[in-house]
Amino acid sequence: MIRNGWRVLSHFFLAGIFLVLVQSSGFCAALSFQNDTFAFQNATVLKYKNGLPTLQRKLASDPANQYTRRCFVMSRSVVQFHKFARFDSRGPALDDKQLARRIRAIARHRPWAPALPEDQRIVFPGYANLREMSKARREVFQKNLGSGFATYFRPSNARMFFQRGREYQDKTHSNLDAALTRGDLFVAYLSTYPRLSINHAVLIYARHPGHSESGTEHYLVYDPNHVEAPRELTWSPGERTFTYQKDIDFVGGPVRIYQAYGKWLQ
């Protein structure tokens, strides 16, 4: 009985040490698609048919969404909220001005910086998670996350013109695996230049468990254009190529990936 009592006490003691370490370090739990992503979506500027852009007139039945060109902004912001924000559903919700100030404060954090300890994070009371809050306060978020137009002028976008070989994609794949292994997130710029079938940013946040017999690796992706469920990216070691899932605004198939927000000027 005494031995069992000491065993129980030791378990409680170790659990307490773990909680202290988590709260006082930059520990970051795994990203949950249903909790840690935005409830609203980014919209494409062009209308698409079978995954290809078209000049077809927008129909009255098409869903209205004026929030466009924000795929980089939203992917980056999910990283920043995951690393630097804390939610407290017990407190009273902030008014629009207070909430706007805290959203802008999150956006000023460098997305490549280590995650903050829980007790140093910016607190958002009244909501349990990012998805819940962004659903209830969509307009405040959209007005304060940042400009999408500015992302067209990111210096690192120029990589698509001259870093197009499979060796570079090999290196990117290694960097992706390294980031996920250390518990980090990976914002990916997807391009098919000189074709223009995709020019888009997404957030790769986890691996699918297991490998296929061919060695193909599967990754879970938060795509700002699709709020309903994760998308899938694959890596084929034989072809040394990434492939992105087909949907309404992408014909599907091989893409080149460039990491964004992994360091300064990236």
Image (spheres, rainbow, N blue to C red):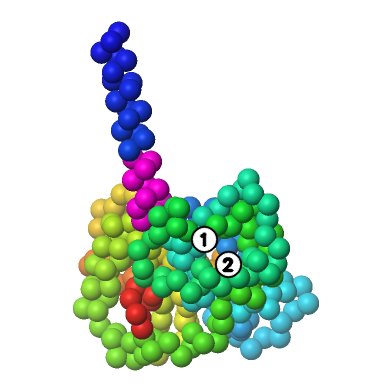
**Tag count:** 2
Q: Is residue 143 left or right of residue 184?
A: right
| Badge number at residue 141 | none
Give the distance between the C-alpha atoms of the residues marked 2 and 1, in whole angstroms: 7 Å
Which secondary structure lies at badge 2?
helix
Does 157 sit above or below residue 9?
Answer: below
| Badge number at residue 122 | 1
Q: Residue shown at 61%/84% (left/top)?
A: 46
Badge 2 or badge 1: first in the primary sequence: 2
- The crowd level at tag 2 (other Cα within 10 Å; few <14, some 14-19, many 20+) is some
Does 176 sit above or below residue 12?
Answer: below
| Residue 124 location (% of width, % of height) | 58, 57
Which secondary structure lies at badge 1?
strand
| Residue 68 location (% of width, % of height) | 61, 79
Q: Residue shown at 32%/27% (left/top)?
A: 11
Q: Amino acid at mark 2?
A: Arg
Q: Residue shown at 29%/14% (left/top)?
A: 4
Q: Visible in this render: residue 146?
A: yes
Does 25 sit above or below residue 71?
Answer: above
Q: Quadrant of the N terminus?
A: top left
The image quarter in which residue 173 lies: bottom left
Circles 2 and 1 in contact, beta carbons < 8 Å: yes
Instruction: Please give the residue where the numbered disc 2 appears in the rendered image.
Output: 102
Q: Which region of the structure is painted magenta?
A: 18-30
The image quarter in which residue 167 lies: bottom left
Q: Is residue 245 left or right of residue 9?
A: right
Q: Amino acid at mark 1?
A: Ile
Residue 46 belongs to magenta span: no
The image quarter in which residue 260 lies: bottom left
